[in-house]
Amino acid sequence: MSRYLYSLLLMVLSPVLLCWMGLRARRAGGKWAVLGASRFGRYGKQPVQTGAIWIHAVSLGETRAAHPLIRALLDLGYSVLLTHLTATGRAEGQRAYVDEMAAGRVQQAWLPYDFPGATRRFFHHYQPALGVLIERELWPNLVHASTQAEVPLVLASARLSDAALYRTLRVGSLMTQAYGQLARVYAQSLADAQRLEQLGVQGVSVSGNFKFDLPLDADKAARGRAFAGQLGRQVVAIASTREGEDAWFIDAIKRQRPRQGDGIETSLPVLFMLIPRHPQRFDQAADQLRAAGLVFVRRTELLSLGDDSSSAVSACKKADVVLGDTLGEMPWYYAACDVAIVGGSFAPLGGQNFIEASALGCPVIVGPHVAHFEQAVADARAAGAAMQVEDAGRAVRQALMWLDQPAERHQASEAGRHWVTQHRGAVSRVVHGIQSLLAASGQAVPDQSTDRP
């Protein structure tokens, strides 16, 4: 398919696509600005700081993965333009860079839809010095417009599954030409690099996964440990569950009350933490817990009582489950737990990031569907930091077995920390590449001696 035909089809089908986008936004909640002017590359007299490094992080996961890169660039004195496609990604960016946005060092915008005119207007308005696409977001007209505007594009922390490779090849020259216009590509793993090379990408570098470089929130982790220390119960976190998975885990928790059978016995009941990935499912998970007859307390209730206060701890004494109905608190949950089950991998959704759990010393259990983290799961299993099981019921049983095996659990904990340490450094490799591209195009390195907020 040619880019011209693609653009024609996009415009013809745009009413249907915009309706689909509107339905997606309605289901997900949040402010999406589906029909906002900026989605079509129209910005009016909106003030802008040109010459920034543009980073596109499509949604929540990519935005979090981009944090160490953004911080590294800000520390070097660069300004950043941060774009998103989803409301959760935008909200995460707003939360993380409040001070930097107030100081004008970070700008935030919606990525325009991939219409030729919209993408041209985007580059004309913002005039970035260079663009970085996080993980996998590639649009033909966006790439073409960047080439026309002479803005080099970098695909960083890139991943490409076998299924995604097959779909891309089926599209034909449209996507292979887009990949061929990228200035640099940094893959997460050798397998990702090999798949990208099958698309005709030349000179792919294996830099690693940005998620290994994510800084840990030491304050939240310390408060999580303090809470666990006062609680006096063993804790299993079931994190980042996706659509359909909550019901499976709730059923598995219910079947393990009281803990008996399989040779597993304990005098103190285990406290489970169920943490849906998306906020629109918090209330639904609460309804499911209530219907299952499980006693639960919301994380927001604990915060209102004083986080790790005696009142918050008391509220959990008779609870079966803490419902994680907050965002940005994964360090607290992981630091408070003894074992982490990471969702998104029990339904065929590709898996979710479990690296932060390993960095905090949590033995990790994942499900069978880990296409988005295939290499990371294989490496973590080989290092003894993670286990992979077939379904939610087996995951809960394995977690309970680990709780009664302190030596094995400690070994997995230390293996996880070591594994994460060994894989850090992806951000520094990409930053070096960005600086070399900017230098080649005559861009000056910012003066780092200037005091900044």
Image (spheres, rainbow, N blue to C red):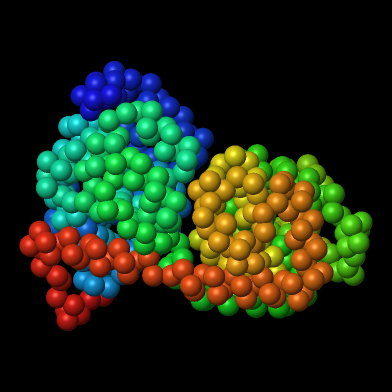
Q: Quadrant of residue 184?
A: bottom left
163 left or right, relative to 430? right
Q: Position of residue 297 (x, y in %)?
A: 71, 58
Q: Quarter of the image for the C terminus: give it.
A: bottom left
Q: Which residue: 70% across, 51% down?
A: 389
Q: Total label count? A: 0
The image position of residue 78, as x and y in percent, is: 21, 66
Residue 245 vs residue 89, the one in the foreground: 245
Question: Would you place residue 448 above or below residue 272 in this image?
Answer: below
Q: Nearer the viewer, residue 18 or 62?
A: 62
- Would residue 87 be visible to someone looking at this image? no
Tell me where residue 190 sits by quadrant: bottom left
Q: Residue at x 30, y 35 (%)?
A: 175
From the image, which quarter does the N terminus lie in? top left
Q: Is residue 112 above or below residue 109?
A: above
105 vs 84: above or below: below
Residue occupying the far left of the picture: 442
Can the viewer see residue 426?
Answer: yes
Instruction: Judge left or right: residue 109 versus residue 226.
Output: left
- Front one among 386 and 125: 386
Residue at 65% across, 49% down: 367
In the drawing, does residue 423 fall left or right of residue 347? Answer: left
Residue 343 x, y percent position in the rendering: 62, 50
Residue 114 placed where, x, y %?
27, 34
The residue sitting at 15% across, 62% down in the picture is 438
Residue farthest along the top direction in this orientation: 12
